[in-house]
Image (tube, grey):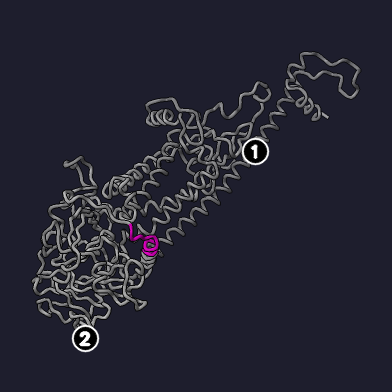
Amino acid sequence: MSPEDMEDMKEGSMKDPKPKPGIVASDAVPPDDSAAAVLLPTPKLALEHKHPLAIRWMHWVNFPVLSIMIYSGLLIYWADSQHNDLNSHQVYRIGVGGWTLVRLFPDWFYKKLHLEFGLASGMGYHFFFMWFFAINGLIYVLYTLASGEWRYLVPNRHSFSEALQVTLHDLGLSKHHPPKRKFNGGQQIAYTSVILMGLGSLVTGLAIYKPTQAHILASLLGGYEMARWMHFWLTMAYVGFFLVHVAQVIRAGWNNFRAMVIGDELVPYAAEPLGAEAQGKVADHG
Amino acid sequence: MDDNIMNDNLNSDPNPNESNMNGPPANGQKGSVPDTPVSEHNSMQVLAAAEAQARAKAEEHDREILARLRTKSRRGFLVGGVAAAAGLGFWRWLNTRAEVSGIAAPFRKALEFNAKLGRLLFQNGILAPEFSPADAVKDFRRNGDVGLAKIELKDWRLQLVGAANGSSHPRFVDNVAAWTYGLDPADLADGDGTDDESDTPPEAEKVHEDGAKRSAVKPESMEMPQSPPAKMPGLLLKMEDVHRLPHFEMVTEFKCVEGWSEVVHWGGVRLRDLLAAFPPATRSGRPFDASTRPDDIPEYVGFETPDGEYFVGIEREVALHPQTLLAYEINGTALSADHGAPLRLVTPLKYGIKQLKQIGRITYSETRPHDYWHERGYDYYVGH
């Protein structure tokens, strides 16, 4: 074994004495009454195919595309923010009724980000990359449905209590971690929600883009201003998702991250090899 | 020979330790089997050898796994790196294309594509939601004053270019562009004739103008002739000609491209009624009939302010839409100067940037009229 391999295994927490997320010592050796089987050394490592190629591509394509959509959206909002004192209805704010805590966004925010004011270029980007965002998202949904991958992603009746356990565990408030699966309840809820949010962005975006031709849609959403409000807060929710997602990926470690690039994850060897369709025994985050 | 025994033992007996306690097998029955019993010592040796073999196998297996992992990682990250570089290259390429009307060509093409799709799906029968007059704002926001000039109503005329059989009409003049609106001719289409004549509150206009300047848009030529063309035959209509058309009111939401919107109570005449009263020359040569042959007229209608500083173009189907107005009232009272007195364009099918204030000239046009914000990087269509 080369030193890198050893490093790999450490990073994959294969030899970590403390059970890290997902590695349960007893999982490595299946229970067996036969004494010989217990005594004889078995392989320690296995590769598990975790993320299909198509999903990896769509995940990584979405990252820059959504970033550009958020960036160009900021340029568009800026045109509104520059009239902070003029906007009587104040769609983009934190506040209730006639009371506003903060208007989104203040001037310093744009300055901090070193953005260059440009409503025209903002709309140019937005109405170009919206196609990439929509088509990539549509293919993702169709693929997960056709491949059966949705079974791992869609929450079930246990997901919510499990999500609570995972959250308490990850915040260090509880030692108990629910059984490991490919995606835990928290992930199922998060990953399904973010797809629904994507759909929400497309629907509210269309209502803003064609408020007359799609006026029924706009009315169903509560009107033009409400559609704008939703479009804005969905974007804020993406940013929230992104921050938690990245934090969890960092927590879960290199082995988990690498699986999103190469597809395979290093897992403890199991006597009966897990089929490609079998659920993973290693939990991950992110 | 030893190897065979070992394997036999392993394969046939799941528990060699126990079999030892059963004592030696019956003597002399099987000549091929050694008649000495497998000793405790031998059993240990067998086990140790088996363990060593299994460990070697296990380690070999793990080495193979790690080798496969290395190969996959190398390939995966290499492909990922190339894809990321290609993506970055694509982004750079997009942003460095030559500009077409103030925006890099690929984005201009996308806007034109979206517009084409929008026009394909457009249905003239779909109406924007209307509100109750009580929902309308009392003081409609002012935004932008480009092209606004102080004009006395008695000096105002509506230049109409492209009407069919114009020359036989009593309002026909052989050069509508010669009309000066009581303005100093030096102020007409000379580039900066209007700013100091506007009624618009300065703070409102400044933000907007400032915004336009900050948008990194290179000012282009205005596509305006420095002096009016020698001759532009057409009709020179008076306000009474407009008032003769059916009065129409609507309460619709006015939407600014900057992101704000207000419900406004408009009064005026429908543009389609003007088109019916002063029809454009048709393609077929037959009289214009909007209900049966809406495609028989030129594809665009252009609008310009009297001084030629602000100008827009709208598509035929937008001009014929029942909610596209030539408005002369807000909340039942005549338009104020900063809202475009005496006549402005209003349509819930476009952002405010198309809803030109203070119309001086209307042109039926087969080619796309020039458009102020389009030249500054915006979408031409901006259609709702």
**Residue B353 point in image, percent of width and height:** 24, 63
As shown in the figure, which amino acid type bears the numbered disc 1? Answer: His
Find numbered disc 1 in the image and state the secondary structure of the residue it sits on.
helix
Provide the secondary structure element on which disc 2 rests.
Answer: loop
Q: Which mark is residue B61?
A: 1
Residue pictured at 43% horizontal, 55% vertical: A132
Q: Is residue B117 magenta?
A: yes
Q: Mark 1 lies on which chain?
A: B
Q: Magenta stretch containing residue A175, yes or no?
A: no
Say which label, 2 or 1, has the lower sequence index.
1
Left or right of B119: which side holds A157?
A: right
Quadrant of res B349: bottom left
Label 2 lies in what chain? Answer: B
Numbered range of the magenta stretch: B115-125
Image quadrant where one finds the C terminus of chain A: top left
Q: In 3D space, how far apart are the residues under numbered discs 2 and 1 (Cα atoms)?
A: 90 Å
Residue A118 seen in this snapshot:
no
Does the image show residue A221?
yes
Q: Where is residue A247 in the image (x, y as percent from the top left)?
A: 39, 40
Side of A37 relative to A74 (left or right)? right
Residue picked out by circle 2? B230
